[in-house]
Amino acid sequence: MAAAATTTVEVSDDGDHPVLRDDERGIPRSLSLLAAIVEADAARHAAAATRPAESDLVRAFRGGATPTVAIGEFLERIHAFVRLESVRHDIRLQATCYVLAGIYLTRFLGSAAAVEAGIRVDPSTAHRLVAAAVFVGAKFGNTSDMLPTRWTSVFETSSDAAIRAGEMAGPERRFLRAVDYRLSSAATGSGGSAAPWSRRCIGA
């Protein structure tokens, strides 16, 4: 994502900031902010989607079909379906998950592997890139001990079946290798709190 999409904001000692709060619909504002940044990047690099995929990394994140659902709706569906995934437990992706997803996605795009492959956030890669980033952000940034066990069905349902069940395992591994598994640096404080993240948050 473009460097201009990251800014420094003040976060209180208890980790509170407006971007970490829910909107009137119960959707984390950090989700909407991440969606806006990804959608802007995809629009900026729209021409890249029409070019042949010249690397395995690009092919992995293009996948077999491009979802037609907008990124914002895609993320909101993921957020909603994660809560529905378990009947016995109240599972919810924390607002900090989407902040981490933005940090990880920026880190991925700046990695040597991504630069060499020439991968960008464009309409053909955006959904799988943001899905991988959210997946990793949820694993390492969720404050709950309980996480969804059927992520594949969540992604498939949220993408109107464009992302098939089981498809994301490969992209997730490529994503983690590209960032060299750097997931718990200053960006991830203990307990998933936003306060220790060098007081940084994704901003427009």
Image (cartoon, rainbow, N blue to C red):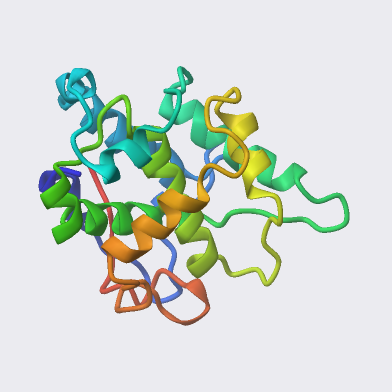
Residue 64 located left or right of residue 103: right
Q: Position of residue 173 (x, y in %)?
A: 42, 59
Residue 204, quarter of the rendered image = top left
Q: Position of residue 127 (x, y in %)?
A: 41, 34
Residue under the point 71% across and 66% down? 146
Residue under the point 47% across and 72% down? 193
Q: Position of residue 142 (x, y in %)?
A: 56, 65
Q: Position of residue 49 (x, y in %)?
A: 23, 23
Work out whether residue 24 or residue 143 is closer to the camera in this orientation and state it.
Answer: 143
Residue at the extreme bottom: 190
Work out whether residue 108 or residue 185 is closer to the camera in this orientation and state it.
Answer: 108
Residue under the point 44% across and 64% down? 16
Residue 163 located left or right of residue 157: left
Residue 26, quarter of the rendered image = top right
Residue 154, quarter of the rendered image = top right
Residue 150 located left or right of residue 70: right
On screen, residue 29 above or below 50: below
Residue under the point 27% across and 61% down? 178
**Residue 25 in sight:** no
Query: Looking at the rendering, in which quadrant would you find the N terminus?
Result: top left
On screen, residue 66 above or below 3: above
**Residue 184 in sight:** yes
Residue 191 located left or right of residue 114: right
